[in-house]
Structure formats: C-alpha cells, structure tokens
Image (tube, rainbow, N blue to C red):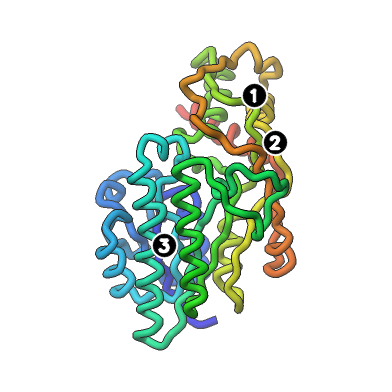
Amino acid sequence: MSAVRALVTGASGQDGSYLVERLLAEGAEVHALVRAADEEQGPFVLPQAVHRHVGDLGDGAGLESVVAEVEPTEVYNLGGLSSVALSWQEPALTAQVSGVAVGHLLKASHDLQERTGRPVHFVQASSAEMFGRTSRVPQDETTPLRPLTPYGAAKAYAHHLVGVYRARGLHACSCILYNHESPRRPEAFVTRKITVGAARIARGLQDELAMGNLDARRDWGWAPDYVAAMVLAQRDDVARDYVIATGVSHSVRDFVAVAFRAAGIEDWERHVTLDPRFARPSDAPELVGDSTRAREVLGWSPTVPFEEVVARMVDHDLALLDQP
C-alpha cells in the first residue's frame, strides 16, 4: 500500500480518537479538522504527530479548502452532531453539520481526484438511526431508510450523497454503524451516563439514576472494532456500503442491569427512577444489524461481547472515582 495521508473529521471524539491512534501506529500522515474550542480543551487530546486544521463542519467553503490543501489519499468523516436527543433541539444545525457538510467533503474529494489524477478514498460514518421505523429485523444494506429523528434524516441525506459520488467514480463508502461504546464515550450519552451512575452509586456518591425509556432495544458493540471496520472498508478495492453490527440486541434495561452488576450491585431497580424528561419524542423500534457483507467481504467481526463492553466502561469509571 502506498503512503497514506489521512484527513479525519471528528478526530477528538470517541471513534476519531481510536482511528487517529490506529492510523499513526500504521505510519500514516494524519491530518485532523478541529474546532478552535477543541484546540484548547477537547474530549480527546490529539497526539503531537497529528497535523491540525482549525475549521468547522458548518463552513462548507472552509471544508473544501482544507481538502484541497491537505490533498489526502483517505478521508474519514466521523464528525457531526452525534446526539440523537440534541438533534430534536437543533434540527437545522444537525442537517448542516451531519448532512450538508458531507456534500462539501465529497465534492472536494472528487475535485481533488479529478485535479491530481490520484484516487481519493472516502468513508462516511453512517448510522443505524437512518432505518428508523423499519419492520425488517435485522436490517442490512438493502433495508429502506425511514428515519424518525432529525439526526437520522441528516445521516440518510449524507448516506445517499455517498452513493451519488460513488456513481461519479469516487471510492466512497458508508459504514452504517450500530451503537458502539467505550470508556471514551462522553457522559452526555445515555450509556456513559449509566456506567458513571452505577459507579457513583457503588461508591456511595449518589443514590439514584434517572432514566427515560428502558425498553428501547439496540445492537451494542465495541468502538475500536467499528473503527477497524471503517479502515477495512476504506482499503478494499471496491467501494461498498456496509452494516457494522454485532447482530445481537439488548434493551436499555439490560444495559443498566449489567452495569450495576459490574459495579457490584445486584438490586439495581431500587436505584433507578423513570423521568419523562429523558424520553425522546420519537424512538426507533428494535435496531439490530445484519453484518454479513462486512464479515464475508472484509473479513470483519466483532471481538468484544456486550457484557464485556459494559464492564470495561464501568471498570473505567470506578477507577476514575478511586483515583487519589
């Protein structure tokens, strides 16, 4: 493989941080789009070896300029507004940074390829939230998109754009990522809220954990596994879309029970309260993915089972609390 020059958006987030570490370990030249605020204090501190480019997904012209300047061989778009709940409060912003921005990045990548005559590979971090109100369980790459949230709608628009530019000759892939977690998941997300709450209750620092819908079912995996899938899709000879999932679903209730058990608490029900403020206006039914294509074409498979994913997060949060 020739030398890789990668441009990563969302590099300071959960997936971006694992991706940056992986690419650097491979010897790639890594460039990251960072917001000015993240330069000073972001959720993940970028290694010094990363070339930083201050910009914003809301600035389309700026995005195209960065691509033209960096001349990447690989573009990974992991940025965007990543909270489904927040997308209800900011639907227009969600459309801009998770949808329209992808159009600018794809156009700039295609223009670069046309100008230089060198191939540019592009990976879009799509989301299972695009499937929304689906009656097909599990979902695969052929499942119709019926988003139920502004987040899912923005991701669906970007997903279709990937197909448009792939038809124009760009090696563009969408990895349709199902829920995936790690200790690097921000506390604003319900999964990390659960593991932090279980850890704090176990240490006597709080008594209750307020939750919304405990019955929603999702397909949860290990974040570094999903990053590995994106790299495999990027490097394959043929550009395709891939569902990246474990194929096993669990309820939020299951997640809570496993988290409390990992923290040493069996009778979790007495610590959990239901608060309608945390319920979403509309929630997708059971989302569970069929990753047959990724397994057969890319040789990808998940490596960490659900219970272990949750336990690793709880262990991390307990360790943080136990620090002197």
Residue 254 drawn at (x, y percent): 69, 29
The first of marks 1 and 3 along the sequence is: 3
Residue 51 drawn at (x, y percent): 33, 65
Please state, as top left, top right, bottom left or bottom right, where the C terminus lies in the image: top left
Which type of secondary structure does the marked residue at label 3 adopt? strand
Distance from the alpha carbon under mark 3 to that under mark 2? 31 Å
Classify mark 2: residues with Cα within 10 Å, few (<14), some (14-19) or many (20+).
some
Distance from the alpha carbon under mark 2 to that under mark 1? 15 Å
Instruction: Give the residue pinned by disc 3.
Output: 8
Residue 10 drawn at (x, y percent): 41, 54
Question: Three-letter amino acid code at disc 2?
Answer: His
Residue name at image x 37 percent, y 86 percent: 116
Instruction: Give the residue pinned by disc 1.
Output: 260
Distance from the alpha carbon under mark 1 to that under mark 3? 35 Å
Residue 311 horizontal side relative to residue 82, left or right: right
Residue 67 horizontal side relative to residue 221, left or right: left
Labelled disc at residue 250: 2
Residue name at image x 48 percent, y 52 percent: 155
The residue lying furthest to the bottom in this view is 117
